[in-house]
């Protein structure tokens, strides 16, 4: 099932892709201006939805044990490709299997062997599964990097991350993080409307605070670092969002 990501989700994924071992929830929270509890909750949700599927170590086997890493480019019958891919994982030395949506070379198998004789053993095991090895090559190096579009935008305001969704007509929904110095921080929704801090057309429909999603009422106090979901029938502009932003940073 597809899960719609917001900007905070994308920044979390980018940080984990960059260095999942050393990055922490407080570090990501500082960069995205939300609480560490919110980051932990978002990561758990991304795991539940199957967006984050695992955290893997990248190993240089040549340095570790002088072993050889080999990529087998195979042809598998399309009707049996998924089944063969699962069976391939049981071959000793296979560390990665990739299915491709193509007619030929539709199965890539990455394997580690002690020497060329061990790689030939893996090759024979693949053939026994009914795949044709069209080509193979020793892997010299592999470089990973995070997905750039999910990273921070140098031209964007890092202190307030907003995600917009357009609905029918002019209606819009936005998620915005409350700055510590925002006019609405520390006041209730009822007072914010009465003092014209919050636009009459803006309806706060949800508040995410740490790992809890709150249903807002008139006496609900908005706090710094809250992630507020705002709805407006006439659309949301910068003036409407000023209530949630520190005036000195706008």
Image: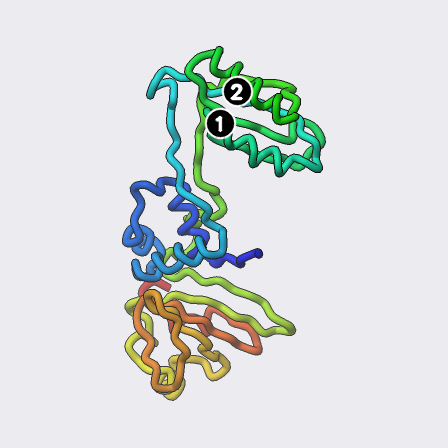
Tell me, yes or no, whether the two marked residues, 2 and 1, touch with CB atoms within 8 Å. yes
216 left or right of 124?
Answer: left
Query: Residue 207, labelled with which disc?
Result: none
* Residue 90 x, y percent position in the rendering: 50, 31
* Residue 93 x, y percent position in the rendering: 46, 24
249 left or right of 132?
Answer: left
Q: Is mark 1 on a helix, strand or loop?
A: strand
Residue 12 in sight from this viewpoint: yes
Q: Residues within 10 Å of mark 2 (few under 14, many from 20)?
A: many
* Residue pointed to by mark 1: 94
The quarter of the picture where residue 160 lies is bottom left
Residue drawn 50% across and 27% down? 91
The quarter of the picture where residue 207 lies is bottom left
Q: What element carries label 2?
A: helix
Residue drawn 44% across and 12% down? 115
* Residue pointed to by mark 2: 122
The answer to whether residue 203 is above or below residue 43 is below
* Residue 97 x, y percent position in the rendering: 54, 32
Residue drawn 60% across and 35% down? 99
Q: In this view of the protein, which residue sits in the foreground, 57 or 82? A: 82
């Amino acid at each position: 099932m597809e899960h719609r990501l917001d900007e905070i989700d994308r920044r979390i994924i980018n940080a984990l892709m960059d260095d999942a071992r050393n990055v922490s929830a407080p570090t990501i929270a500082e960069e995205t201006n939300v609480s560490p509890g919110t980051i932990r909750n978002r990561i758990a949700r991304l795991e539940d939805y199957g967006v984050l599927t695992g955290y893997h170590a990248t190993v240089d086997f040549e340095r570790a044990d002088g072993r050889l890493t080999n990529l087998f480019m195979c042809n598998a019958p399309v009707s049996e490709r998924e089944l063969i891919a699962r069976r391939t994982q049981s071959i000793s030395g296979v560390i990665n299997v990739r299915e491709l949506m193509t007619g030929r070379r539709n199965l890539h198998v990455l394997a580690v062997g002690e020497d060329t004789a061990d790689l030939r053993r893996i090759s024979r095991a693949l053939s026994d599964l009914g795949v044709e090895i069209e080509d193979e090559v020793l892997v010299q190096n592999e470089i990973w990097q995070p997905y750039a579009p999910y990273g921070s935008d140098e031209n964007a305001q890092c202190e307030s991350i907003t995600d917009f969704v357009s609905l029918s007509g002019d209606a819009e929904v936005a998620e915005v993080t409350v700055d510590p110095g925002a006019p609405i921080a520390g006041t209730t929704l009822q007072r914010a409307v009465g003092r014209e801090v919050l636009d009459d057309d803006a309806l706060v429909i949800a508040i995410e605070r740490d790992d809890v999603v709150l249903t807002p009422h008139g006496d609900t106090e908005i706090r710094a670092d809250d992630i507020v979901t705002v709805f407006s029938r006439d659309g949301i502009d910068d003036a409407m969002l000023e209530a949630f932003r520190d005036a000195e940073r706008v």
